[in-house]
Image (tube, rainbow, N blue to C red):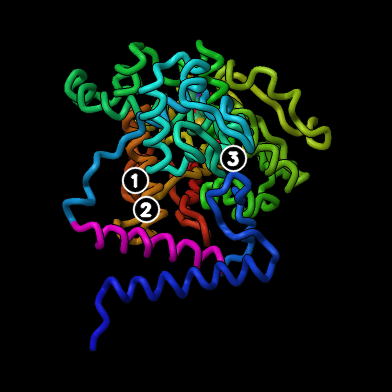
Amino acid sequence: MTVSKIVELAIRISENTAKVDAYLRENDLPSPSFHEDGPVDFGIRCEQTKKAQEEAINLSFELQRLLLGPLQFMNPVPNGLSLQAISKYNMATKVPIHGDISFGDLARECGLSEINTRRFVRYAIVFHRVFQEPRPGYVGHTAASRVLAEDPVMRDVLSHYLEECFPSFAMTLNAIDKFNGGTEPNQTGWNLYHETNLSPWDYYDANPESGRRFFSTMAYETEREGRSNTVLVNNYPWSSLASTSKANGEEEEKGPATIVDVGGSRGLTAIQIAQATPELKIIVQDLPAMIKGASADLPATIKDRVEFMAHDFFQVQDVQADMYIYRHVFHNWSHANAVKILRALVPALKTGAKVLVNDYIAPAPGTLSPLKEQRLREMDMIMLTLCNAYEREDHDWKRLFRDADPRFEILTMFAPKGATEGIIEVVWRG
Ligand SMILES: C[S@@+](CC[C@H](N)C(=O)[O-])C[C@H]1O[C@@H](n2cnc3c(N)ncnc32)[C@H](O)[C@@H]1O
């Protein structure tokens, strides 16, 4: 008898889950659990086990969808309202660890009605495993809600995605209509939701608390598997960079290289590159509010080689360097604006200078594992909603550099092993 698709999936899920379980047992690590004392980071450090874990997740999504059927699967509408409320009213911090609180008391602490508190919490319990109801009418923690109670970074991340992105998604088609498909960063669903004409960057500049939460979310994203800045740090031969300049008209002199990390935020990537390569000097450029006070956080060992500089990357670049890094920058901008950013760089470029991009090079649909492709599509949708931008495929990258200036030549474009994002190395032919 041939095995049906659903049974085949169940067998493969079982095989892969057994591999994860064996690893956890062998390494004395706790088994995944929703219990409030359950593990948050499972501690899996072995690549093969991570692969088995991802395989089990992908296959179980597929099995779930097949068992639900094509119609049931679209229903109910994905809804972030309950998590948005949990974030906005800071609910997790109001629930005691290893205890519980009545819906009535939680409602009072949040300034909400009891009926709305109950509905938000019960939705989160069944859809997200955030909170539990250990006895009727009382709210306690699960591992997920406990993280929100104890980790301010996770609260920042939740608030960015649920209080900024989620309500803005719902306004995005209105924005497309209102602005006739315009691609400026202040013509988005995010703008309609925030009732502002400012782009997110200008808004964060003017609203430091929103800017702080955004930076905190970016820093968290920078640590995430496959998108981590270690992908860039570990996959470029940094020490091969040496500054070359013409001296006495003819002679070529080599010296320590200078890198500019354009839109480099508070220097998380620059710090790692500088720590890994002592012969480099790095200038981190960003908007004034983003870099304010950042040099105070530099580790002492690299303080003399990493510098922060206010610079708007739409204005002419005046630092002549050997390399300009744009990490997670172009995916925030439409084609026309990305062209402008590159053209502003041209006056500073010496022949042979490099541009290094670290962003998604979106592969053909179905090429990435479903979990990774979901992440890419999710980011692409966020880019539309927040910035009117998009995640580029290889032909989009080629078009960008060609349209900016034909003297840019793409040398390499690749996704390092295990990474979901790519690295593009470009040279200025002058
Ligand atoms: C998505 S973040 C990426 C940050 C950093 N490169 C990284 O990889 O984490 C985009 C950055 O571009 C900066 N930015 C936005 N508009 C800018 C402008 N006009 N000039 C300079 N930086 C800008 C933002 O402040 C932010 O730090």
Q: Nearer the viewer, mark 3 or mark 2?
A: 2
Kindly identify the amino acid type of the residue bearing the numbered disc 2: Glu
Is residue 95 placed above or below 45 in the rendered structure?
above
Classify 18 as above or below 265: below
Mark carried by residue 373:
2
Could you say whether the residue bearing mark 1 is in a helix, strand or loop? helix
Q: Which residues are magenta?
A: 49-69
Q: Position of residue 226 (x, y in %)?
A: 52, 52
Which label sits on residue 323? 3
State whether residue 313 appears in this view: no
The answer to whether the residue labelled 1 contacts the one labelled 3, judged by CB atoms less than 8 Å apart, is no
Residue sitting nearer the eye, 424 or 421: 421
- Image-based side of 148 in relation to 128, left or right: right
Amino acid identity at mark 1: Arg
User: Which of 293 and 423 lies nearest the eye of the viewer?
Assistant: 293
1 vs 3, front mark: 1
- Residue 232 is situated, as x and y percent measured from the top left of the image, at 58, 49
Q: Secondary structure at mark 2?
A: helix
Query: Which of 343/93 is in front?
Result: 93
Residue closest to the far bottom? 1
Which residue occupies 61% across, 30% down? 96
**Nearest to N terminus: mark 1 or mark 3:** 3
- As helix, strand or loop, the secondary structure at mark 3 comes to strand
**Does residue 5 lie above or below 259 as drawn?**
below
Sequence-first tag of 3 and 2: 3
**CA separation in Å, label 1 and label 2:** 6 Å
The local crowd at label 3, few if under 14, some if 14 to 19, many if 20 or more residues have their Cα within 10 Å, is many
Q: Any magenta on residue 68?
A: yes
Q: Position of residue 179 (x, y in %)?
A: 21, 19
